[in-house]
Amino acid sequence: MAEAPETGVDVEALENEGDIAADYIEGLLDIGDFDGDIDMDVEGDRAMVSVVGSTLDELIGEDGEVLEALQELTRLAVHRATGERSRLMLDIGGYREGRRKVLFQIGTEAADKVKESGEIYPLEPMTPFERKVVHDAVAAAGLRSESEGEEPNRYVVVHPAS
């Protein structure tokens, strides 16, 4: 069992998740007659699978909705094969990476507004991935944030420093 030093992350298990997910995604690409190359990686404590190609917009959908659904299906395929819940992250056509940059900026700007006003600042509803990026940006700015509401309308609230 390969574990990253001092983290307790089972890299071998995450690589296995990535392999299962890549096979599943490859099958979907074949069924839909999409051309794409699949890259796998382990980032932190999750497997990352990326699909790169020139004609993948249909697999992303409006506001990433199709991508979110494909990620959930891929996680289900991994769960069925391993019996373990997966936190795998799927990216298609660099959508998540581009979105991560935009969201980090949104989180930074929200933190700046809270620092200026001293008031809490709620943001629009976001997916779990989006909220995580915003929480990270707010924390990097030295403030605290939390998620409120129920899915699919869960949102981030940025709080002033105490």
Image: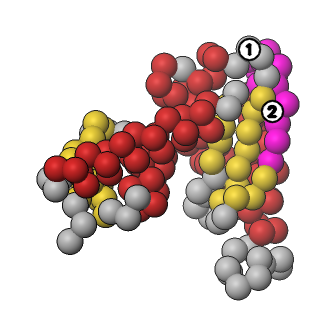
In the image, taking residue 106 as reference, residue 11 lies left or right, namely right
Q: Residue at x 68, y 81 (%)?
A: 8
Image: 53 above or below 152: above
Q: In the image, which residues are magenta?
A: 29-40
Q: Is residue 123 visible?
A: yes
Circle 2 sits on which residue?
Answer: 26
Q: Residue at x 77, y 16 (%)?
A: 54
In the image, taking residue 58 as reference, residue 30 lies left or right, namely right
> Label 2 amino acid?
Glu
Q: Is residue 150 visible?
A: no
Q: Residue at x 64, y 52 (%)?
A: 88
Q: Residue at x 80, y 48 (%)?
A: 40
Q: Are marks 2 and 1 in contact (CB under 8 Å)?
A: no
Give the alpha-carbon distance from disc 2 to disc 1, as whole Å: 15 Å
Image: 85 above or below 156: below
SS of the residue under disc 2? helix
| Residue 134 % position (x, y) | 42, 49
Of the pair 106 and 29, the residue shown nearer to us: 106
> Label 1 amino acid?
Thr
The numbered mark, 2 or 1, whose residue comes first in the sequence reads 2
| Residue 145 % position (x, y) | 31, 59
| Residue 45 % position (x, y) | 65, 65
Residue 55, numbered circle: 1
Image: 4 above or below 32: below
In the image, taking residue 85 as reference, residue 160 lies left or right, namely left
Does the magenta-highlighted stretch encompass residue 35? Answer: yes
Scheme of colours in the image: secondary structure
SS of the residue under disc 1? loop
Residue 96 placement: quadrant: top right
In the image, taking residue 142 as reference, residue 51 lies left or right, namely right
